[in-house]
Image (cartoon, rainbow, N blue to C red):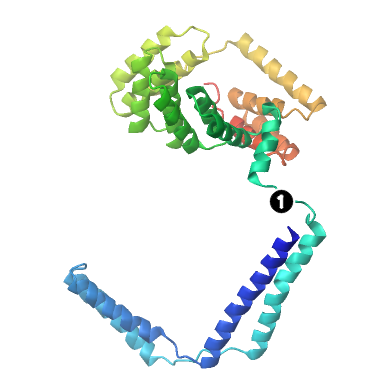
Amino acid sequence: MIAFWVVAGVLSALCAGLILWSSARAAAAGDADPTTALYRRQLREIDDLADRGLIPESERAVTHAEAARRLLAAADGAQAPWISDPGRRRWSLVAAGLAPLLALGLYFAVGSPGMGDQGFKTRIAAWRALDPEHLTAPQMAVVLQALIKERGGDPEAYGFLAQAQMASDNPDGAARALRRAIELAPERADLWEALGEVLLAQSEGQVTPQAHKAFQEAVKRDPTAVSARFHLARAEVEAGDRRAGLAAWRGLADELPAGDRRRAAVERAIAAAQNQPAPQELDDGQMAAVQGMVATLAARLEAAPDDAEGWVRLVRSYAVLGDAARRDETLTKAKARFAAQPDVLKALDLAAKTEPMR
């Protein structure tokens, strides 16, 4: 490791010296300003493009005149030779030599020169030895990829990999994993539905033709696929066929149990499409009970503030209740506490974006 940084410092000093030496040679030569040569070359290029029919004659005349005007202005102007102060060159050379030395000294002072190299394979082996619950989503994705490469993948393995990739904010990787799973098990509706949802994430919620096709394949194999049917109906509404989309949503809502959260989401979509207020999901007593549970969670976190999952739930609860002030206050406090844990910060941001109850 130390040898690497020494070699890197020497190479950077040599590169800086070579650049400065070349610049000094150009300055010592006293070359004239190359602006006129540039404009002459531009005129030749304009004529060449016009002769080959790549630009019309009208555009040729305009651009030719503009380039000629700039050429005349440059030719009439005073041409100062390119020179540099030898004293400044000396200090530049000193700075170029000292910079890598200072960087190397700083590394020895605050870095870890005694730490050995940690190859990627070594890190994968260490992650595989850990309990999966202790792995971050990106680490889990890497471990699953290694296992699939060693043992061969089945639809379940690729499905788990897709989930890990999505949790790692990598929808492209999730889509690749799901397409591979579908190649192995093309009749599984859940894989087609998951692919459609991943494609939605890639397009920021837009039902693209690819996502539409995936949802159609899911419904073809499982007519009860809730997510696929919901988004297919949404695509009809957004395409202008609101009557068909609303009919599909109503049919879906009627099939879902009254207490199912998915039914509430469908009813909200129906209300929004009809420019109507969303149905009230909780009565006053139920709302008071929910607020009481949120207050209990907040009090518990004050006493035991190291519960990252609890903070995420609290931020999401305030977002669902529509209490933006407490949501933002809690989010700021939680981010300060878990500033060194990027996975927790990402979960907090996602929780803060939860849609409030209508």
| Residue 45, position as x, y percentages in the image | 28, 76
Residue 355 or 100: which is nearer the viewer? 100
Q: Is residue 275 visible?
A: no
Q: Quadrant of the N terminus?
A: bottom right
Q: Is residue 25 above or below residue 265?
A: below
Q: Left or right? Give the position of 51 relative to 16.
A: left
Task: Say whether residue 202 is visible.
Answer: yes
Residue 163 relative to residue 103: left or right: left
Residue at horizontal 45%, vertical 33%? 175
The quadrant in which residue 356 appears is top right
Q: Residue at x 67, y 41 (%)?
A: 123
Give the x, y percent position of residue 60: 22, 74
- Across and down, in percent, residue 31 comes to 47, 91
Tell which residue pokes out farthest to the front in this image.
Answer: 151
Residue 58's place in the image compared with 261, above or below, is below
Residue at (43%, 28%) from the top-left corner?
Answer: 195
In percent of width and height, residue 328 lies at: 65, 34
Type of amino acid under label 1:
Asp
* Helix, strand or loop at mark 1: loop
5 and 295: which one is in front?
5
Q: Nearer the viewer, residue 78 or 279?
A: 78
Instruction: Rate crowding at label 1 as few (under 14), some (14 to 19) or many (20 or more) other CA atoms within 10 Å.
Output: few
Q: Is residue 205 left or right of residue 24?
A: left
Q: Residue at x 67, y 89 (%)?
A: 87
The image quadrant of residue 196 is top left
Examine the rendered structure and indicate whether residue 101 appears above or below residue 319: below
Read off the residue under disc 1.
Answer: 117
Which image quadrant is residue 189 in?
A: top left
Count how many numbered circles sit on residues in the image. Answer: 1
